[in-house]
Image: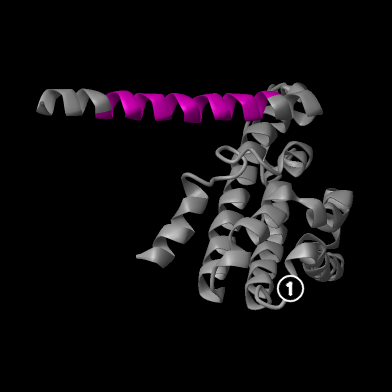
Amino acid sequence: MRIVKEFSKGFTTHLPPFRLVLGLCPVLAVTTTVANGIGMGLAATFVLVCSNVLVSLLRKVIPSKVRIACFIVLIATFVVIVEIIMKAFFFPLSQSLGIFIPLIVVNCIILGRAEAFAAKNPVHLAAVDGLGIGLGFTLSLAVLGTVREILGAGTFLGTPLFGESFEPFTLFAKAPGAFIGLGVLLFLLNAVDRFRLRAREESLQRRF
C-alpha cells in the first residue's frame, strides 16, 4: 500500500541522518541528552508535517521560479509556532535547544522533502511522508542522544544508571563525541547492510 510505503521509508531507506546523511548540524549539536534529541526531533516533525501539507495544498499555485523562497516562508511560519509553544510550555527544553529551534527553517531535510516530495504529491501522501521522515529523524536523535548521555554522563533521561564510582567518558558530552558516536552508528548500519546483502547473495547462489 502506497501510504504504508511512504511512511515506513522514513525508518529504512530515507532514515535521516543515517541514510540521507542530512540535517547533521542539530544531530551533532543537541544530542548531549536523550531529552534534547527527542525534543528537537518532535519539533522538526511538527514543522515537517505541517509544511509538507501546506506545500502540497499550494503546489499548483506557487510559481516555480519562486518556489524555494515560498517554501522557506511556509517553513519559517511553522518554526515560529513551534518556538512560541516550546517557550510557553517547555521553557527549560527551549533554553537547552537554544538557537537550533529557529535554525529548523534552514534544515535541509525539511526543505528537501518540500521540494522533492510535497510539491509533487497529494496532501495525504505529503503528510504521511513528513510524519515518517520526522519520526525517523526523532528516532535517530534519540539513539545518538542515548549513546552520548549514557557514556558522557552515566544517566538516561537524567536518571543515574551507575554507582558513584562511575567516571563518565566526558568526551561524548562534547563536540568530538558527537562525531565519534555518529561515525560508529553509521559504521554499524553499513555493516548490517553488507551482511544482509551477502546473505541474500549466498541464498540466491544456493537456489541456482
Q: Horizontally, is 147 left or right of 97 in the view?
A: left
Which quarter of the figure has residue 95? bottom right
Predominant secondary structure, magenta span: helix
Is residue 73 shown to the viewer in this render?
yes
Q: How is the image coloured?
A: one colour
Q: Which residue is mark 1?
A: 62
Q: At 77% across and 60% down in the image, what residue appears?
A: 68
How far across and down, in percent of the image, does residue 21 sit?
A: 63, 37
Q: Secondary structure at mark 1?
A: loop
Q: Is residue 57 above or below residue 2?
A: below
Which quarter of the figure has residue 121? bottom right
How far across and down, in percent of the image, does residue 202 sit?
A: 22, 23
Mark 1 neighbour density, 10 Å: few (under 14) some (14–19) many (20 or more): some
Is residue 164 shown to the viewer in this render?
no
Q: Horizontally, is 143 left or right of 198 in the view?
A: right
How far across and down, in percent of the image, does residue 179 sit?
A: 71, 26
Q: At 56% across and 51% down in the image, what residue appears?
A: 136
Count all numbered tags in the image, as a single digit: 1
The magenta stretch is 180-200
Please identify the quadrant where the C terminus is shown.
Answer: top left
Q: Horizontally, is 90 left or right of 129 in the view?
A: right
Please identify the quadrant where the N terminus is shown.
Answer: bottom left
Q: Is residue 85 above or below residue 111?
A: below
- Of 100 and 157, nearer the camera is 100
Q: Is residue 136 above or below residue 74?
A: above
Say whether residue 45 is magenta: no
